[in-house]
Structure formats: C-alpha cells, structure tokens
Amino acid sequence: MVKGVRKAFPDIVLTVDAKAAYSLKDLELFKAFDEFNLAYIEQLLRENDIIDHSVLQKAIQTPVCLDESIESLEDARQAIELGSCKIINIKSSRCRGISESIKIHDLCMEQEVPVWCGGIYAIL
Ligand SMILES: [Mg+2]
C-alpha cells in the first residue's frame, strides 16, 4: 500500500502509523520502508516495547515516532536515552494532561527531538 501511495504521490510528505501491530520479527519489512522516503513511521511495536523500538530505530533509516509508548516525561526520557525514536507524538489526554505534556515538549526540544500533538477521539 505504501509503495502505491508513494508512486502516485512522489513529492508529498508521507507518514504511516502502524498502531503497534508489528514485532521485531518484521524488521526486514521495516528496512524496506526506507526506500519510500517517509517523514516517519509511527508506533511499529507494542507500547511497552521501548527497548525493541531502540533496536528497530538503529536498524532503519526512517525516523521512528513513538505515540502509545509515551505516557509521561519519564517514558520520553527513557525513549530518547535509548534511541528508541527520533520523533514523539504528544497526546495530552494520554500524557497526564497539559503540564506533563509541556514537560515532555521541553525535554524533546532540549534533546532536539521533534514533537507533534496528536488527538484522541472516542467513537460512541
Ligand atoms: Mg498513532
């Protein structure tokens, strides 16, 4: 699917979100994604797999963005120190509110890790 989208739109900024659906067994697949010039791949592995995300990030060129893995400043600090990602998606409703989100933002800026703010919605 990504190959088809990139072929149809060769010049757009393109990202994908894996929604924690994969494991390190899929590492060769992730390496193949490097050819698609993605801005980042989001949350490939389970939320508690910060160590495995570190292995993954070191094995691929495409920046990894962590989403579900980041629920606190401490999560962000560990992810950055382990090299588990190059981008963080801060969702304030998941990250203990605005004050903690600002702390995560400030840490990321100090460490030159770009952030963006995602949203969470509920389907009733
Ligand atoms: Mg996401």
Image: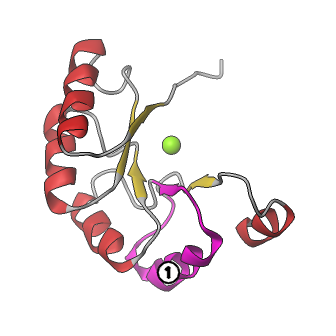
Q: Is residue 24 above or below residue 21?
A: below
Q: Is residue 25 above or below residue 43?
A: below
Q: Is residue 31 above or below residue 79?
A: below
Identified by mark 1, the residue type is Lys
Nearer to the camera, 92 or 46: 92
Q: Is residue 25 magenta?
A: yes
Where does the image place residue 73, in percent across and percent down from the top left? 17, 33
Check the picture and name the quadrant holding the C terminus: top right
Looking at the image, residue 25 sits to the left or right of residue 36; the answer is left
Nearer to the camera, 114 or 15: 114
The verdict on label 1 being within 8 Å of ligand 1 is no
Q: Where does the magenta region start and end?
A: 21-42
Quarter of image, res 29? bottom right
Q: How many marks?
A: 1
* Residue found farthest to the top: 98
Residue shown at 22% from the left, 14% from the top:
99
Residue underneath mark 1: 31
Check the picture and name the quadrant holding the N terminus: bottom right
Q: Residues within 10 Å of mark 1 (few under 14, many from 20)?
A: some
- For the rendered model, the colour scheme is secondary structure
Residue shown at 16% from the left, 61% from the top:
82
Residue shown at 26% from the left, 67% from the top:
54
Where does the image place residue 5, in percent across and percent down from the top left? 79, 62
Nearer to the camera, 94 or 15: 15
Q: Is residue 118 magenta?
A: no
Residue shown at 27% from the left, 53% from the top:
48
Where does the image place residue 78, in percent across and percent down from the top left? 14, 50
Quarter of image, res 64? bottom left
The local secondary structure at tag 1 comes to: helix
Quarter of image, res 74? top left
* Residue found farthest to the bottom: 28
Q: Is residue 118 above or below residue 47?
A: above
